[in-house]
Image: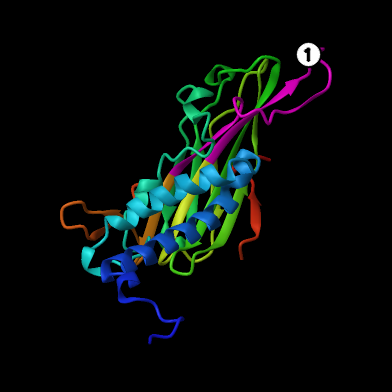
Amino acid sequence: MAKKSEKSPKYNLSVGSRKSSAEFGYSSNLASVLKNALAPLVFGQYGNALHKRLQKCITAAIARGLAAKKGNRTMAEGDVSVLKGLELNTYTPFSALTFSLVLRAAIFPETNTLRIETPAIRPDCFRWPERAQEAYLNVRCLVVDVKHRMVVGSYTLEPVTIAEAGTGSPPRRATVKTTDLEDRMVLVATGVSFFRTDSEGEEGLISHNRKYYAAQLVEAAYVKDGKVVVFNYNDKKPDPVMPSSESEVLTIKWDNDD
């Protein structure tokens, strides 16, 4: 008679199932790490929903890697760009609160730096909520060791403040000196929120109403052999090209600020 602790052969997972399970676990763990690092842009909200969104993107990204490596694939073998454009507020997209507000991020592996640029931002670049007086644009950059599933560098730029009754903000550029970028994923996210007064027009605070803030991943890339990897869809292999363009959070000043 078989021991009670022994499982019947019919319960043994197939090789394919074990490989899928391994990648599912990897995606879930990495999603949890990214969720915690990006949560401040959405005031720590949407934990479960944001985790599911991140995990879905990570699973899709590594699924584009070589089938022969299934079970051992990480984001290092996958299409990291799948994360680009991901909305962090599951209820309100970034475009619902802004008009043509495009933040640009360039990655320079040879110097371990990022360059973040914003255009001139006028008050009419926003869809202003009722009683809103100021809009805040926040930017957060992450350097992620995808093999060990940990954030090794986190950087936040000083918020850009635009008054509803003001003239706006001029174009800005910031140079972010990072930790070593080799064999690491780079994520850049931006968020928008509003300072609103009460119904009497007196006391105010930054609104945590889910209709009045949003955040989005505007850049997602992987660095290999000193270059930014661009995924090749034809043969499912990463094709490195030159870019066109420690978990302590560091605040970076804009280059053109005094």
Q: Could you tell me residue 29's position as x and y percent?
A: 50, 61
Q: What sort of colour scheme is used for the picture?
A: rainbow
Work out whether residue 123 or residue 31 is closer to the camera in this orientation and state it: 31
Work out whether residue 165 or residue 98 is closer to the camera in this orientation and state it: 98
Q: Dot 1 lies on which element?
A: loop
**Among all residues in the image, which is located at the extreme front?**
1
Whether residue 186 is visible: yes
Q: Is residue 51 left or right of residue 183?
A: right
Whether residue 72 is visible: no
How busy is the neighbourhood of tag 1: few (under 14 within 10 Å), some, or many (20 plus)? few
Is 193 part of what is drawn in magenta? yes
The answer to which image quadrant residue 69 occupies is bottom left
Vertical order, 216 against 239 (above or below): above
Is 177 part of what is drawn in magenta? no
**Among all residues in the image, which is located at the extreme left?**
234
Residue beneath disc 1: 199
Q: Residue at x 46, y 81 (%)?
A: 5
Q: Residue at x 63, y 30 (%)?
A: 193
Q: Could you tell me residue 120's position as x and y percent?
A: 53, 27
Which amino acid does the dot numbered 1 rest on? Answer: Ser
Vertical order, 182 against 35 (above or below): below
Work out whether residue 101 or residue 20 is closer to the camera in this orientation and state it: 20
Vertical order, 112 against 2 (above or below): above
Q: Is residue 217 left or right of residue 161?
A: left
Q: Quadrant of the N terminus?
A: bottom left
- Magenta span of residues: 190-218
